[in-house]
Amino acid sequence: MTTTDTVSHVPVQPRDKTMGMPRHHMLIFACLFVFMLVAPFLLYPIFLMKVMCFALFAAAFNLLLGFGGLLSFGHAAYFGSASYISAHAAKVWGLTPELAILCGTGTALVLGIVIGSLAIRRQGIYFAMVTLAFAQMVYFFSLQAEFTGGEDGIQAVPRGELFGLLNIQPDRVLYYFVLAITFGGVLAIYRIIHSPFGQVLKAIRENEPRSISLGYHVNRYKLAVFVISATFAGLAGATKALVFQLASLTDVYWTMSGEVVLMTLLGGMGTVFGPLLGAGIIVAMQNYFASFGAWVTVMQGVIFVLGVLLFREGIVGVIAQRIKKPL
Amino acid sequence: MVRQFAFATSALAVLAAVPALAQDAIDVKIGVLNDRSGIYSDISGEGSVIAARMAVEDFGAEEKGLNVEILSADHQNKPDVASTVTQQWIDEEGVNAIADVPTSSAALAINEIIRNEDAVFLNSGAATTELTGGACSPHTVHWTYDTYALAHGTGGAMVREGGDSWFFITADYAFGHQLENDTTAVIEEAGGEVVGSVRHPFPGSDFSSFLLQAQASGAKVIGLANAGGDTVNAITQASEFGITQAGQALAGLLMFVNDVHALSLETAQGLVLTESFYWDLNDDTRAWSERYMEEAGDMPSMVQAGVYGSVLHYLKAVEQVGSTNADEVVAAMKEMPTDDPLFGQGEVRADGRKMHDMYLFQVKTPEESEGDWDYYNLLATIPAEEAFRPLDEGGCSLVEEAAAGGAEEPAAEEEAEGEEAN
Amino acid sequence: MFELLGIPPQALFGQLLLGLINGAFYAMLSLGLAVIFGLLNIINFTHGAQYMMGAFVTWMLLNYFGIEYWYALVLAPLIVGATGIVIERLMISRLYHLDHLYGLLLTFGLALIIQGLFRNEYGISGMSYRPPELLAGGHNLGFMYLPNSRLWVIIASVVVCFGTWFVIEKTKLGAYLRAATENPTLVGAFGINVPRMITLTYGFGVALAAFAGVLAAPIYSVNPNMGESLIIVVFAVVVIGGMGSILGAIITGFGLGLVEGLTRVFYPEGSAVVIFVIMAIVLLIKPAGLFGRAA
């Protein structure tokens, strides 16, 4: 997205680096980690796990939108299909949880390659519409395929035993497994953003013709970031299936694609921590305002409109501008 | 969670021993979980909460030493939302029973949670027979209706009335397929035939093409194996294309009185459908429904009536047991005969199925109708044993356990088989 | 009897006619999107919600004010178009200097708000709209019974679509519009109030959606979600047709309606995805769409 006002324009060349990471990023990650370690004793663990799954999902999406400049309106396809496959693998094939998640994530990867290679033929708004249309095809497939259980979804998915050894049925045990996945995923995305690959992506986002003239195979980079983003979205979806012991149509429906855009926009696209915060806020809103019914939809719409009109930088983006440091 | 569960049961075991000594009030929390904003909000929604409150009132909970509190939430027809809310209600609020829960996917999700918790699931709104079949749980009671009953009611009765050739318009997903298959079995058993079927995308808005195919098939009955907005749309368009006027009958396999209300009689007239409750059945249902209408503004659907019936029966069982221990309460619910003004006398079977008659209705013409909500003519009453799936065909593991435990069950099974042979 | 691919030709004829009627809705909606996109460079995600509003306003006019269908045919597009103008002035106009994607996000948010509000007020089961006397009956064409309301959809949409095409391609006003699409600054220099033209164009595009909604009211049940499922199909139609020409939007709309109609006969399970499959094929062969100019 070639906006002139996103925060990522603040040069990412801070001098105070520890192990390749700016010190304040390190500090925030550490605080987050410590907080998440004790959180299940303060808050409801299933709610926290839901937040983490969506945080990873939003971070994956942000990699594509905030750093690749590509707005996908069909990310539910990867999230949802991975969740179906991982649920199926755990329940029907009887795989251990880590293998089930791997199967789901792999599915998202393959799907990302197929859809991505078609979608990157178009740009901007067309790209968004094309991804939306493909996601809709995945939705129809999920609705009709036998193994997805149609409207019922795949229920009673066993959480199983990690590596065949550790029983992760209890919520708190599973919690730390999910925490490890989420943190690993978010850190991996962080690494990708700050790698040479990530720098080329930013160059393409800012000025595509120029990047081409510099000799970069722009389409290869776009496809790569698309596939990586789809894969991590899949990882989030596959994990969610084990948390809720359920894979359902909600996860592949296009409103899910809209929600992840909302999370990223609210938290701040193109920031590292924005999507995590955005996911936390939206999930909390859905959780605690559930009894308001359709008003939740209206509230989400209002946040969208206000976000676009008033603070396009998102919450974390605004903070980053205040403290003049990229977050 | 395991430890919490163990703790909870032991605490309850202590509690269960107490009532004989002290006449302290028993706290009962019932969570009404249903659709409050979506496609099933008219048939369940706030109306079910009102019905649950009426049950508490009519039971006279306070005089009987029960301190009942009713919670409610919206599950948006999503199984993930439903399971989160249920888990949270049980873990953090100490809810003893979950009531209503339309949408099969959400109901099955809750069914799985409840199985391992000390809570009871009083389902009224969902249609799936799995709840009392392969997925049956010792803590679940399925009250109002299921796909088997709908298929048998509408399918069997219509063939007997002469509608012996069918064409299905089926929503292309698990629920639609199940409804079509169940009904096909019934039609063929009754001597009718299915001349064709077409699967429409879900959700669909334009049914004209499928209706035309149904018309061309020359079938006497067009069965709509879909639900909610799809059914309403299909019926509206059938009337537009003059399908019923041309002599074909429409059968809605899952329809509620509220759908007819939304469609208006002009469009819906002549439609045949199966329900387990209608406000205008007898003096008792009329009296209750008038009271309900004063509060809710609409007449009750069978789902809302089912919430009333199931909560009432649950409270009776709690009173008898003297605690909210799920195992004991459900056992008592299955032991005691049911009796309420809406569904009459009946029983809860070993697999959790509540047995009562079902009714085959035909929607009145505008001329026949004598006022608001006067919508149905009763075509036939389907006895409970015929309406619901025989106990031994569901594949519910509880049935064998019950048979091993008691001598009465085999007799009941034989009886059911006898009915089936007829 | 002579049969075509196992289907009697009469039945096939009927199905093609029905496909054409559905195509009429696609054509009107994608036309509105194309007009708006042409001048504003915004994909109007609210389009589906505005189509739904058209149907609802028609319903409200009859049930609250007793205003008949024929008046609603004019009034509803005007009313909904006016709300569109307000939206353009208050919100969309602030985004023109930004990436087009923000327009997509804004209109997506607006669609959520509108649908949520209607869902709160009217529930979701939908309401039926009684067609006026003239549209109530139907004609027996020999191969099928064609309800007047459907016949009317074809007539009305063809008139509106080609009327729009004529205005934009053949009149002076249209020439200004096309010029402003190419170079707004230059057109402004000729003393034409370009911002006002943009506002009115948005209003017109929205009114087209609402008009489609009015036509839909007597046929489908009027419910808050009626636009939600349709809009995504229309997006695919737009991608297939390409945004290059007004005529392209119209022809693609009708054409895909026919294709979908045929699918419903031969492979009904695939009728929901056939348009998306075609979209994928078109993207492979002709990324700019059938009628689109290369980007």
Image (spheres, rainbow, N blue to C red):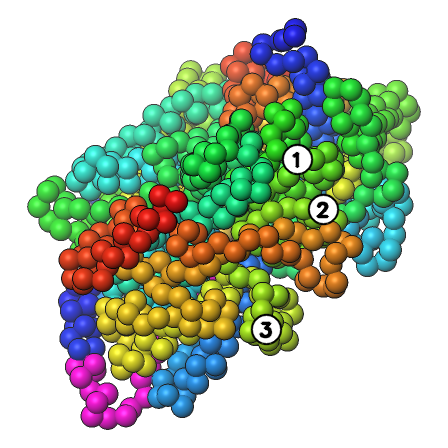
Q: Residue at x 18, y 63 (%)?
A: B406
Pointer 2 or 3: first along the chain: 2
Residue drawn at 69 percent across, 42 percent down: B236
Q: Is residue A264 above or below residue B85?
A: above
* Residue kind at label 2, given as amino acid type: Thr
What is the residue that sits farthest to the top in this orientation?
C2
Spatial separation of the CA atoms under disc 2 and disc 3 = 29 Å
- Whether residue B22 can be seen here: yes
Q: Nearer the viewer, mark 2 or mark 3?
A: 3
Residue for badge 2: B267
Residue C17 at x, y percent in the picture: 72, 22
Rendered location of residue A262, percent (x, y): 50, 48
Of residues C96 and C269, the one nearer the viewer is: C269
The magenta-colored residue range is: B14-37
Residue A219's mark? none
Residue at the spot of label 3: B283
The residue carrying mark 1 is B248
Q: Is residue C119 toward the left or the right of residue A183 in the image?
A: right
